[in-house]
Amino acid sequence: MNIVVLVKQVPDSGADRNLRSDDNTVDRGSANNVINEMDEYAIEEALKIKEAHGGEVTILTMGPERATESIRKALSMGPDRAVHVLDDALHGSCAVATSKVLAAALGQLNADLVLCGSESTDGRVQVMPHMLAERLGIAALTGARKLTVDGSALTVERQTEEGYEVVTASTPAVVSVWDTINEPRYPSFKGIMAAKKKPVQTLALADLGVAADEVGFAGATSVVVEHSKRPPRSAGVKITDEGSGGVQLVEFLATEKFV
Amino acid sequence: MSEVLVVVEATGEFGVKKVTLEMLTLARELGTPSAVVLGGAGAADALAGKLGEYGAQKVYAAEGDQIDGYLVAPKATVVADLVKRVQPAAVLLASSQEGKEIAGRLAVKLDNGILTDVVALEADGTATQVVFAGSAIVKSKVTRGLPLVTVRPNSVTPTPAAATPAVEQLTVTIGDTDKLARVVERVAEQKGSRPELTEAGVVVAGGRGVGNADNFALVEELADLLGGAVGASRAAVDSGYYPHQFQIGQTGKTVSPQLYIALGISGAIQHRAGMQTSKTIVAVNKDGEAPIFELADYGVVGDLFKVVPQAAEEIRKRK
């Protein structure tokens, strides 16, 4: 099975993150940039499917030059190769334009299965799997907590507000996963060394047949007008329980009219 | 005034979700609200009354297995056709997984910009979003097409404005590519009478400090006394204390209730991402240095197994 895993490099969600003051985009220069955590679960799932059914796992990333660090990190977990869509014109791309570029790249990769994380920790927009499925005319099974592959038949179990659903589709398809689906492996020393030699193909917009004015700021379908730091919450009253902490807490709730 | 389409979120038992009423309230500021019901057979008739109470002048309905039997693709096709026909001033959907997914497909079908997790929307289409774990506020605009916006629950106070909507059944023409992801089974899990996590006015959440799954009964008890929902930190979910669908934080749900009570939660940045915009925050933790206290309006440093039962008892006394 030919599997492509979408990997996005994002600023570490465990540290302070900022938007740039000049163009309102994510400030990647000052951030500690890492693989979007949810994507690691997609990589793990791809490797498990390959181990069980054979095939090839390709990492697909769209991002600036520094995203190569995340690509090598992803490859160190075990995938076979990577494709990096790299073009200065991509800076400032909206989700709609991003999906156009990724769909064009996927069109060249002939994937049976496209795996990705359910959301990125920076944008948290959650639309990419369905945008890609819409463009490629293939199925999207989103939010998988369990994925079963049987030949070309895919079965996904997905969490819903009211319980869970079982959803089926045939390949080719896009499947997005939550962090409940597996436990991603740590790269081994051997894996890290091997990753350095794995092929990483760079594709520019021209290679994908996408015009520069369809992406980036030129082709954006939405714009950030302004941004500001949200004033940090200030700590209020802090008491130490000396036997009546529960009563005092309820006293506070009563003043705020919650009780 | 132009129509504003509000794509209705409802439960499987045809209960209108609160976020739908918030969207109708918001839509009235932008134009004339029309509700779009996409669901099982009979959904529109069951929901129309409630939608009218909050100002829906019209209810468009697409119902039945061809809508409900697949993941969002048929719904997006129906809404896209409707948008082309009625040329609305804006389209509002809930910032739920399904709402975002329908919106994503609509954006591609209509080659239209999309804004998600919006907490406020002005008449000129300027949307406010809170990003990066609640640390930054962003104002954005769709620059191609109409404002296609998903609204985060608990962003607007729903206010009634009675109307008597006419129900129009839509002719549904969906293609083969809309039927690729088939729902073969829906399993409802027991969740009792508690409100849904993202919509609840009160959320009581437990963390690693709760210690084990059985002890979560304490969290549930306090939630029930306050009429709230139960949440859990990632640490608690990863330890198997509580199911994943109740996880709050960077890799779980985002909540913004009137009252958030954190029990035994240290308040790592990933957790704060999911609750930082709550109106009032209360924390109980035995570690006085826990970062959760930095944002708590009221903090109790103490043993939650002493503080919480005492608080529960006190609430019962006052009832």
Image (cartoon, coloured by chain):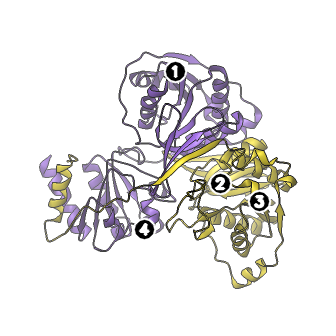
Chain colours: A yellow, B purple
Q: Nearer the viewer, mark 3 or mark 4?
A: 4
Q: Nearer the viewer, residue A114 or A195?
A: A195
Q: Is residue B165 above or below residue B66?
A: above
Where is mark 1, residue-wise?
B59
Which is nearer the eye, A230 or A130?
A230
Q: For the residue marked with disc 1, what is the amino acid?
A: Val
- At which x and y percent is residue B11? 47, 36
Where residue A220 sits, quadrant-wise, is: top right
Q: Marks 3 and 2: same chain?
A: yes
Q: What type is the residue that disc 2 sits on?
A: Ser
| Residue A186 in picture, x, y percent from top left | 64, 77
Residue, disc 3: A4
Residue found 50% across the figure and 58% down from its top: B132
| Measured Cα–Cα span from mark 3 to mark 4 | 33 Å
What is the secondary structure assignment of the residue under circle 2? strand
Residue under pointer 2:
A176
User: Which one is closest to the eye, mark 4 or mark 1?
Assistant: 4
Relative to A89, say whether B43 is above or below.
above
Residue B98 lies in quadrant: top right
Residue A239: mark: none
Label 4, label 1: how far apart the Cα atoms are: 44 Å
Question: What label sits on residue B268 in the rendered view?
Answer: 4
Residue A85 seen anywhere in this rendered image of the structure: yes
Subunit of mark 4?
B
Q: Residues within 10 Å of mark 3 (few under 14, many from 20)?
A: many
* Label 4 residue SS: loop
Asked if the residues shown at circle 4 and circle 1 are in contact, with their CB atoms under 8 angstroms apart, the answer is no
Describe residue B319's horizontal placement relative to residue A93 as left or right: left
- Residue shown at 53%/34% (left/top)? B125
